[in-house]
């Protein structure tokens, strides 16, 4: 596994723990279909939450949230639709969240959570 | 949190105070500029982002929305950069929001965070003063010019970092080389004296009468008769400008991008546009930003048109309205700009295309038809407004 994938995987674990700590119920992780992958699917207050996690080791190439572009958001929205189609019934409203994990080598981790980015 | 400060949008000589609001909201990172910016102002967001980062501050990792209000007023140029940057810094809590709200900001940012001088600072600071602002922050390169407006406290800053520190940021000062404008060259027309003219008694008397009464003059004579020499000496006869007129003259210079000295020039201006000038060059114009022309720069001074029949007649006739009203009005679909237009017009012409008609020492080679057609290029209504018409 390449270093960036290890970092990404670790970031997603950290994000999932963080969201559970906030009271979200994690439904599924790394759900894949032909359109792509959803990092985390969770439920909160009758809503299904689709979460995109971006992890970076530092800010040298910009903040992780800056890499979530309009095109990426549009793909997430399509993925959310595909997930709902694959899991019929009872998903309530949907929303898309973004989580930024900054995990520098050898020091503390910063996690930022933005609700309803789309 | 919202950061709010002020800047000035200029339309001709008149400035309107523009409020700059910056809001940081919990959304994906982005930088949005709204409120009818033109292309140069729309690029401000990229300059401001780079300048904030290179001045050593953290750009907020959220969505930054900048609003320029009144939203319906078209805004031009890069002079809003400093205001936008400090509003963003205030919204992110880096500087005091109260402090920036009291100050009006003008200045263009470089990517390194240094401030570049802009054109039109003098009329902009005048507008700020009229709107009741007591403190104006400008680039170091413009502070002399801004200080010409009495009753305003001018803060000249070399960089965005210095501006932030003035507004209460805890960043450490980092001295930078300020960007200055080219030094003002002293005008060549200075010190021209009518005493240099030998003989030509009638013409000298005509110039004295023109200077005393503020009359327009038309000089007709062969090449080498001294028309240009006489005209260039008319400003030397005119009295010093009043403080208001001097401010107006320097404001127009500032708008044209010409250097304005550290002290207000009180000598009447002298403008001598070449005869290939377009009417926009002579009276002012432009589609987006309306700029003053040579006639506006000559306001309260002398506008000299050498070889007047060589100017396109439409260009000459564009002067009829300012000669009548003393004001130059430029109408565009979205706005009307006014410039001062109370200049003294001096026109010089040869009597015919070969220039020798009426001369004692040589023969004219033009046909009567050509002679008549040459001077007919200056229209009757324009000549009607010229009180002193003279053969030299």
Image: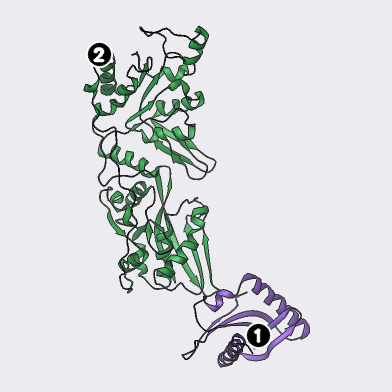
Chain colours: A purple, B green
- Residue B201, label in figure: 2
- Residue A39, label in figure: 1
- Can you tell which of label 2 and label 1 is closer to the viewer? 2
Instruction: Decide if residue B114 is on the left or right side of residue B244.
Output: right
Residue B234 in the image: x percent, y percent? 28, 25
Camera-side residue: A67 or B125? A67
State the SS at label 1.
Answer: strand
Residue at the spot x=51%, y=13% of the render? B373
Instruction: Decide if residue B165 is on the left or right side of residue B24.
Output: left
Residue at the spot x=72%, y=75% of the render? A78
Label 2: chain letter = B
Camera-side residue: B82 or B174? B174
**Residue B203, quarter of picture:** top left
Residue at the spot x=44%, y=8% of the render? B364
Tag 2 near tag 1, CB within 8 Å? no
Residue B137 in the image: x percent, y percent? 33, 58
**Residue B284, quarter of picture:** top left
Marks 2/1: CA–CA distance: 95 Å
Instruction: Decide if residue A86 is on the left or right side of residue A73.
Output: right
Camera-side residue: B142 or B229? B229
Label 1: chain letter = A
Question: Which image quarter is the N terminus of chain A in?
Answer: bottom right
């Amino acid at each position: 596994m390449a270093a960036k994938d290890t970092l990404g995987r670790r970031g997603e674990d950290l994000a999932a723990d963080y969201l559970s700590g906030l009271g979200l119920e994690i439904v599924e992780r790394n759900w894949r279909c032909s359109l792509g992958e959803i990092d985390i699917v969770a439920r909160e207050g009758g809503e299904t939450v689709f979460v995109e996690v971006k992890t970076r080791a530092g800010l040298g190439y910009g903040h992780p949230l800056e890499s979530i572009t309009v095109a990426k958001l549009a793909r997430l929205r399509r993925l959310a639709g595909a997930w709902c189609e694959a899991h019929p019934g009872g998903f309530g409203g949907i929303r898309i969240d973004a989580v930024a994990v900054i995990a520098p080598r050898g020091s503390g981790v910063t996690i930022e959570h933005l609700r309803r980015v789309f | 949190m919202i950061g709010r400060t002020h800047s000035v949008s200029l339309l001709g000589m008149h400035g309107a105070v523009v409020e700059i609001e910056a809001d940081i909201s919990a959304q994906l990172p982005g930088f949005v500029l709204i409120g009818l910016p033109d292309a140069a102002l729309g690029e401000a967001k990229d300059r401001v982002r780079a300048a904030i980062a290179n001045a050593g501050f953290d750009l907020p990792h959220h969505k930054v929305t900048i609003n320029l209000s009144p939203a319906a007023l078209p805004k031009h140029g890069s002079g809003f950069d400093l205001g936008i940057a400090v509003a963003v810094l205030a919204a992110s809590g880096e500087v005091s929001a109260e402090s920036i709200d009291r100050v009006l900001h003008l200045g263009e940012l470089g990517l390194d965070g240094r401030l570049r001088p802009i054109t039109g600072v003098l009329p902009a600071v005048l507008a700020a003063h009229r709107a009741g602002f007591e403190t104006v922050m400008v680039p170091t390169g413009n502070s002399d010019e801004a200080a010409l407006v009495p009753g305003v406290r001018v803060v000249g800053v070399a960089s965005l970092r210095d501006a932030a520190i003035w507004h209460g940021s805890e960043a450490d000062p980092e001295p930078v080389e300020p960007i200055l404008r080219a030094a003002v060259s002293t005008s060549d027309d200075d010190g021209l004296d009518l005493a240099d003219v030998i003989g030509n008694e009638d013409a000298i008397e005509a110039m004295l009468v023109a200077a005393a009464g503020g009359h327009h003059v038309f000089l007709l004579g062969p090449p080498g008769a001294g028309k240009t020499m006489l005209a260039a000496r008319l400003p030397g006869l005119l009295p010093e400008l009043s403080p208001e007129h001097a401010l107006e003259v320097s404001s127009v210079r500032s708008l044209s991008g010409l250097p304005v000295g550290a002290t207000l020039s009180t000598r009447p201006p002298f403008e001598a546009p070449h005869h290939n000038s377009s009417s926009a060059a002579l009276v002012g114009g432009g589609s987006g930003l309306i700029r003053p022309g040579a006639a506006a720069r000559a306001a309260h001074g002398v506008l000299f048109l050498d070889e007047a029949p060589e100017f396109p007649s439409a260009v000459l006739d564009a002067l009829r309205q300012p000669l009548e009203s003393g004001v130059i009005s430029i109408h565009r679909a979205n706005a009307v700009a006014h410039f001062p237009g109370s200049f003294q017009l001096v026109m010089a012409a040869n009597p015919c295309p070969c220039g020798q008609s009426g001369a004692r020492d040589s023969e004219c080679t033009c046909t009567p038809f050509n002679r008549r057609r040459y001077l007919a290029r200056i229209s009757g209504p324009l000549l009607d407004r010229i009180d002193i018409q003279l053969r030299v």
